[in-house]
Image: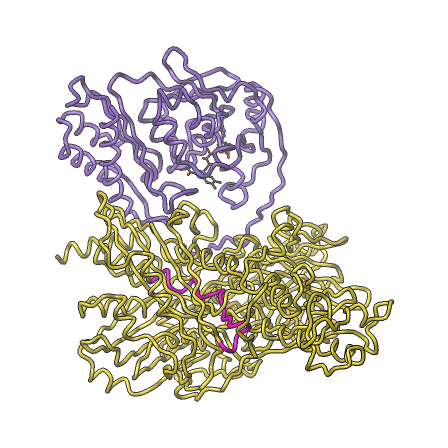
Amino acid sequence: MNTAVSVSRWRHPRFGYLEAMSVEEACALLGEHREKAYLVAGGTDLMVAMRNGKIAPPEHVISIKKISNLSYIRDEGGELKIGALATLDDICHSDMVKEKFPLIAESARQIGSRQIRNVGTIGGNLCNAAPSADMAPSLIGLGARAVIRSTEGSREVTLEEFFRGPGQTSLGRGEMLVEIAVPEQAPYTGGAYIKLPARTAIDLALVGVACVITLDAEKSKASEVRIVLGAVAPVPMRACKAEDALRSALINDEAIDASAEIASQEALPISDVRGSAEYRRAMVKVLARNAIKQAVARA
Amino acid sequence: MGGKVQELSYVGKDVPRVDAVVKVTGKAMFGSDFTMAGMLHAKVLRSPHRHAKIVSIDKSKAEALPGVRIVVTPDDMPQIPISPLLGDQCVLSKDNKVRCLGEPVVAVAADSVEMAEQAVQLIDIVYEELPAVVDIEEAFEKSPPVVVHPDLPGYKQLTGLPIRPDPERPNVCQTYKIHQGDVESGFKQADLIVENRFTTARIQHVPMEPHIALAWVDSDGVLTVRSSTQLSYLVKDWLCRAFSLSPSKVRMLSPFIGGGFGGKGGMRAEAVATLLCLKSGRPVRVSYTREDMFIFGGHRVPYVMDIKDGIKKDGTLVAREMRVLLDLGAYSDFGPLLVRRAVYGAVGTYRIPNFKLDSYGIYTNSPLTGALRGFGCPEVQWPIEQQMDALADKLGMDPVEIREINILKDGDRDVSGMITRSMGVKECLDRAADWISWGKKEKEADGPWKIARGIAIGNKSVSSGHPSAVTVKVWQDGVVEVRHSAARLGQGISTTVGQIAAEQFNVPVEQVRVTCGDTSFCPYDFGTVASRSMVHVGNALIAACQDAQQQLFRIAAPKLGVEPSEMGIGAGKVFVKRTPEKSVKIAELFTPFGLPLGRVEIVGEGYYSAPAVPEDPETGQSERAVFGYSHAASGVEVAVNVETGEVKVLRHVMACDVGKAVNPKIVEGQIEGGIGMGIGTSIYEEVVMNQGAVVNASLTDYHIPTSLDMPKYEDSKAIIVEVADPEGPFGAKGTGEVPLVTTAPAVANAVYRATGVRIKDLPLSKEKVLAGIQALGKTL
Ligand SMILES: Cc1cc2nc3c(=O)[nH]c(=O)nc-3n(C[C@H](O)[C@H](O)[C@H](O)COP(=O)(O)OP(=O)(O)OC[C@H]3O[C@@H](n4cnc5c(N)ncnc54)[C@H](O)[C@@H]3O)c2cc1C
C-alpha cells in the first residue's frame, strides 16, 4: 500500500549559496563539497526537486550562472559547439542552429514554456538526466559529445554514454559539463523529434522519439540511421535493432512500419501516473514511424 | 420583485469592471498581500494513514525548537464540530481518529514558515492503523468492510437541512429522492430502453490563489479573520460555534479572491488560523501550498451513476431511472446539501412522465470533497446528455431533434413538481447548432485525425431558501453606496451591482460606490455560491434602493409639497414625476454638516430569499425546490487522433440563457471561462488516487488546459440568450455555473461521432480513447 503522501516533507531546507565565477572555481567548489553540493544553472529542475523532496537537501548550491563565456553557440569548422549555459531559448532562436541543425532548435522549442526556456539551460536539461529530457534524443541522434571538465582536466564522452539512469550521469566527482559538441552531418541527412505530451504545452514527454537518417544519393537506402527513444527507459535509449532493420532495407512505408514496430518492442517503458507501459509502448510505434517519415522527407 | 421592462441606461451595458485598473496595475490586495507585526506562520502535520487511531502524540521536540510559539494537538481543544451541516469534523482529528490521508492532526505556529515546517517534522505520533474503505461501491454496501463514522446516527444535525441517512447502509450519510409517475410502467410503454453506467473524475479547482487566512485578536477582544472565502457569514457562524465566541466579537474580512470555483465555499484555512491565534494570542497566517490544495483543499466529488431510459420510436422519453452515488470522502462538508442539489441537474431540462432518481452521499476513507462550480449538476448531466445521443443514435434520429422533442416548455410541470418558466434552452440549442453548422458536412479526416461535431444542453439552478441582504447609504453629495457581502472572486459582482444601483438612482455608475468584504458593516449574505448572487444580491439591492429613496422622498415631501409616491429620483435630485422641473437637490435634504434632515442616516435595507417549499421526503415533489434554472447549449467540433487517442477541441460555441446579462462582457467572460474549464474537465483533469492517496499532488501531473489547448479565438464563441425570469432583477438568472455543464458531454458526443467510441468515464484521456478505439477494432 502506498501511504507515502507528500505531506510531511521539510520543503524549505537551509542551504549555502555559492557563486562560481569560472569553470575552474566551480570544479574546485564541487571537489571541496563533494556529494553535499549541487550545481545550479537555471534552477528549473533543481529548485523543483528540492522543494518537492525528490532529492535530499544539499548543504550547498553552487551557482554557475555567473560564469562568463559558457553560453556560446558557435560553428567551429562545421561542428556545432554549445556552451552548457546556453539557454533553451537561445538555442531555438539561433539562426545558425536553425539553419544547420534544425532538429536541435525543433527539440528545444518543445520544452516547457517561453519562461522556462528563458532560464532553463541545455546543460541543466542533460545533467538532470530525466528519461524524458527533450534535448537528449535528438542530440544522441546527431552523435553529440559531452565535454566534461574537472580540476584534473577535460574529457569527452558521447552523449549516449553520458546517461546512466534516472537522474544519473557519467559525471564523476568534481566534474561538470561545459559543452555539447555536435559533429557536422553528412549530406542527405534529415532529422525529426516528435514528442507526445499529456497536453499541448508546458508538459513533459510521455514519449519522445528522435530519428536522424542519412540517405544515399538515390535516396532509396539509408547509409546511417539513429532512432532514439525518450521517456520509455531509465535513460534516453537508442533502438538499435530498429535502426539495423532500416539500414538494410529499401526505404518505403513497409520498412518504416517494421522498424517502428521493432523500436516499440525494444522500449522498456514503465507505468506511472503519466501513462501505462502498454500505452507508451504503443506510442513508440506511432511516434517512431512519424519521426522516421519526417526525417526521410527532410533528408 | 424584479425590474420592469424599461429603457435601461446602465443595466445591460458593457460597463468597465470597477476592479480592472487595480488588478492590472497590481494594486488589488489579495490574501497573501497582508501581513502583520508579530504574525506567526502555521503548518499542520497531516495524517499519513487512511484510517487509524491516534495512540499518542509527543510534541515536546517541536515545542523545544526555537521560533516555535505554539503546538496544538486534538487533546488541546474541545471536540466541537467545524463542519457546516453534520457534526462529523473538528479542526483537528475528531475523537482521536484519522479518517483519510492528509487530514490535519497537529497544528504549529512559528516565526517563519520554515520553522513551522521543521517543527511539524519533529512531532511523534503513534498510530494504530485500522482497515480502510476507499472504493465507493464497497463503502455503499449494506455490510461494508469498514464503517467510516460508526457514530453517524448520533451526530448533530447543525442546520435545518433535513439529513436522512440510509438506515440499511451505515456509510450513507444522506439520501435524496425525486420520484414522479411510475418508471416500471413507463419502461413497459417504451419501444427502446438504453441503460448505462457513467462516472466522473475527482478534480480540483486549481484557483490561482490557494486558500489563505490571517486571524488576529485586537485590543477590544474582537477576533478578525481575513480569508479567501466565498462564505464570510457562514464561516463566521462556524467559528463562533467551534470556538464558543459571540458573533459580536467575530469579524470576517474578505479581500479580492484569486478564484473560488466553489473550493473556497467551506471552512478551509480559517479554522486552523483561528485555533492557533486564540491559543497563541498572536496573529496567525495559514497559507495552503499547491500541494495542500490537492491533498486537503477539497475535491469535486467523484460520482458513479446508473441511468436507464425508456423512449418511444417517435423520440419521446417515457421513463428515466437514475441512481447517483457520491463519494463524499471522510467528512461530509457540504455533501448532504450536494446530494440534494446535484439532482436538479436531472430536473430542469427534460419532460419525462415517469421519473425516479435516488441519490446517496457516501463516506469513504478518501480526502475532503466539496462544491465545485455547478454543485453536482454538471456531473449528473454528464450521463444524461450522452444518453440522449445514444438514444438518438439507436432511433436513427438527429441529436438536436431528439432534444427538441423532449425539452420542457413554459407551463410544464417538471419531474420535481415545479412549473417551468422562462425556459430558454431551445433558443440556446438552436443558436449553438447554427453557429457550429450542425447538420452540414464535417471536414474530411486529416490523416489519423478524425473530425466530428457534438452537441449537449443543460441547466443549472439558482438555489432557494438562503437569503442575501444589502444596504444602500445615500451620502450628502448624492453618491450612492452599496454594501453587500458577496465575495469578489473575479466574477465582477461589484461592477454589476453598481450598474443596478446606478439604474435605480438614475445616476452615472461613477456616482455609485460599492463596498463589501467586511462583516462589521456589510449585511448578511448566505454566500457566493450556487449561481445565486445576481438574483439574491440584485433583488435585495433593488429593495434597498427603493427603501433609501422612500427615506429621501419623505424628507423631500414638505419641500416639494407632494406625496412620496409622486416623486422620482435622478441626476442627484428628487423631483415631482408629473412636473420634473420641480425638484430638490439631494444635498438640500441634508444639513450642511452632512446629517440628513430629521434622520440619523439615509440607509435603505433590502433582503431577498428565493421562496422555497419543503419537498415531500419520499418523492422529492415540491412546487418550489429551487429558484429557477439557467440554461446552456454547447456545440463543439473535435479532432480525435485514432492512433494516439488525443482529443483536440477545434471549435466551441456555448450559448447560455442567463435571463438578462446585466453586463454582457462579464457574462461572456463567464462563458469563455466555462469553455476553458470545461475542456480541462473533459480531457485532462483528474486527481489520481492510489489506495486513498493523491498521486499527482502538483501541477506537473495534474493538467489544467493551457491557451494552446483552447480553440483559437475566432473558433470559440460565447452567445448570450436572454429569456427574462420575472422574479430576477431585470429578468436576470444565474450565470456562474451553467457554463460548466455542457462541454464535457458535448465533447464526448463528438468523440463518439468521430470514432464510434463512447467514453463514459471522465476524463477523455488519450489512453481511454485509444483503448476504446482498439476495442472497437477487435469487435468489428
Ligand atoms: C514548468 C516546467 C516545464 C518544463 N518542461 C520541460 C519540457 O517540456 N521538457 C524537458 O525536457 N524539460 C522540461 N522542464 C525541465 C527543465 O526546465 C529543463 O530540463 C531545463 O533545461 C533544466 O535546465 P536548468 O538550467 O534550469 O537546470 P538546473 O535546474 O539548474 O539543473 C538541473 C540539474 O543539472 C545539474 N547541472 C546543471 N548544469 C550543470 C552543468 N553544467 N554540469 C553539471 N551539472 C549541471 C544541476 O546540478 C541539477 O542537478 C520543465 C521544467 C518546468 C519547471
Colouring rule applied to residues: by chain
The residue sitting at the top extreme is A77
* Residue B652: image location, x then y, percent: 36, 55
* Residue B706: image location, x then y, percent: 44, 47
Q: How many marks?
A: 0
> In the displayed structure, does residue B570 sit left or right of residue B310?
right
Question: In the image, which lettered chain appears purple?
Answer: A
Which residue is nearer to you in this view: A127 or B265? B265
Which image quarter is the N terminus of chain B in?
Answer: bottom right
Task: Find the magenta span and give its range.
Answer: B726-745
Relative to A272, say whether B8 is above or below: below
* Residue B223: image location, x then y, percent: 73, 67
The quarter of the picture where residue B404 lies is: bottom left
Question: In the image, which lettered chain appears yellow?
Answer: B
Asked whether B357 falls inside the magenta stretch, the response is no
Query: Does residue B181 appear in this view?
Result: yes
Which residue is nearer to you in this view: B37 or A1? B37
Relative to B615, say whether A229 is above or below: above
* Residue B336: image location, x then y, percent: 48, 76
The quarter of the picture where residue B587 lies is: bottom right
